[in-house]
Amino acid sequence: MATPLLGQMMAAPLLIPSLLTHAARHHGDTEIVSRRVEGDIHRYTWRDAEHRSRQLAQALRRLGVGDGERVATLAWNGYRHLELYYAISGMGSVVHTVNPRLFPEQIAYIVNHAEDRYVAFDINFLGLIETIAPQCPSVQGWIAMTDRAHLPASRLPLLCYEDLIGVEDGNFPWPSMDENTASGLCYTSGTTGHPKGVLYSHRSTVLHAFGAALPDAMDMSARDAVLPVVPMFHVNAWGLPYSSALVGAKLVFPGKDLDGKSLYELFEAEGVTFSAGVPTVWLGLLTYVKSIGARFSTLERTVIGGSACPPAMLRTFEVDYGVRVIHAWGMSEMSPLGTLCHLRKHHRDLPAEAQQHILEKQGTAIYGVDLKIVGPDGEELPWDGKAFGDLYARGPWVLDRYFRADTSPLVDGWFPTGDVATIDPEGYVQITDRSKDVIKSGGEWISSIDVENVAMAHPEIHEAACIAIRHPKWEERPLLVVVRKPGSTLTREAVLAFYQGRVVKWWIPDDVVFVDEIPHTATGKMLKLKLREAFRDYQAAP
Ligand code: AMP
């Protein structure tokens, strides 16, 4: 048998610090701007970020953090968080981003499950840190991400971030290692059971950064000023801290203030061209921009994902403000990007309405992700845009098994996403539901997302969730839970009338209830489990 002939190119491993050193060497003067929790705006460059990351890696080594050990962060988007990302992974340890919006007991569970050795935190989370500290025996030190002047008084012996790195000279060559070394850990915001850890590697992260930057993905370049609204504590801000370095883009970090006014002012002041976030934050931004009659002077496009982007929001961005929306689907277990929605060349000849219809879908798979939909008996379903089934994914940045789990969730090498979708003949995926949210009425499925999207197009509806309620004949029927816009006196009858002609008759909700607020998960998704509990015994009005 002939021996395979090996290629003779350099065996350079795909390591995360290479993104940072690239940005520092080739885009060294490009700025990173942060709104700090201390209240001011901080600016420096990729060159500075690289130097300080090396100082931080030295400091963590001095503290005794070893290979493969976890260091947690509880922080907003900002330059110190970026340094932690690169320093911890770059030195061979694992950056564990913790979502501060979780309940303290969940955070303690996660920190203990990960066995974090240090926790770095933004000073406004001190109260949370003091609450969980007694429950976290593995943590040897708590690092306040600030300077001595802003160090808060605490009953915990805090370490001061700036003091730690201030004594280091930055002479820390990034070590070479196997590209499959673990680099980051992120727990999924499961709505049931304990959160599960997804352990990313250098290889998966760098490949994902490449894929994310592509024109038919996030379309990123060195000409961009990128403002990640999506938090760095949730799936690495969709990889933006990495892809921004890969293309040498300017980064703008919004810190803790994610309200419409704060975001809009930062967009304008820093010439932001590209942003990314979940629909809820864009609701706030659009409401503010409309209220002051403003326009976006530099924003070109935004990625919307994490939950379905309501078509009405897509239209407002595109038609009213000239901002291109890239609808995207993904999940923590996929680093997170799976599909992104762009038109193809031949779609340009279609009428505007048909183009909009395509853009409302979650898009097509990027290279690196393969998808299939599967029916109840495990058979692969056709890509006809009609058949919907369980969506499966595989690829080099898709999870193989959860951190510290004995078994793998894979089925024949494919990851079951838990989402239900259709795929059309051109490969455009449309997510119809989470499998547990789908409404099963008389043996047929109703897409809660589609029902919600109609409601979101109503000018007096701020937010709407569609959940299943029990029905004696049909088993389940849709109930619409609505938050009205301020000042609206919208009635149940008017909402139901709005559905006429917009969806097939049997998809029209059986009833509408008005609430002051819809609960959200720590990552901004509507918490339907809570709603289902609240309306468990709800009887629709006749
Ligand atoms: P997470 O792991 O917290 O990022 O959540 C991932 C889940 O969010 C996916 O499995 C989907 O159920 C949902 N999701 C993400 N993006 C979209 C989207 N564009 N449309 C509908 N659901 C989405």
Image (tube, rainbow, N blue to C red):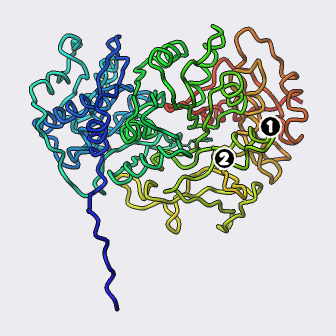
Q: Which residue is mark 2?
A: 431
Q: Is residue 198 left or right of residue 29?
A: right
**Of helix, strand and loop, which one carries label 2?**
strand
Is the residue at mark 1 in contact range of ligand 1, meaning its CB lies under 8 Å from it? no
| Residue 46 % position (x, y) | 29, 31
**Amino acid at pointer 1:** Glu
Q: Vertical placement of 317 versus 90: above or below?
A: above
| Residue 286 placement: quadrant | top right
In front of the other: 463 or 534: 463
Q: Is residue 296 left or right of residue 203?
A: right
Q: Residues within 10 Å of mark 1 (few under 14, many from 20)?
A: few
| Residue 473 % position (x, y) | 86, 46
Calculate the distance from the C-alpha at mark 2 to the C-alpha at mark 1. 20 Å
**Amino acid at pointer 2:** Ile
| Residue 116 % position (x, y) | 26, 39
Residue at 57% across, 37% down = 305
Q: What number is the disc on residue 13?
A: none
Is the residue at mark 2 in contact range of ligand 1, meaning its CB lies under 8 Å from it? yes
Residue at 78% across, 32% down = 454
In front of the other: 130 or 381: 381
Q: Decide: marks 2, 1 in contact (CB < 8 A)?
A: no
Q: Is residue 283 left or right of residue 505?
A: left
Q: Which residue is mark 1?
A: 353
| Residue 121 % position (x, y) | 29, 26
Residue at 62% across, 33% down = 325
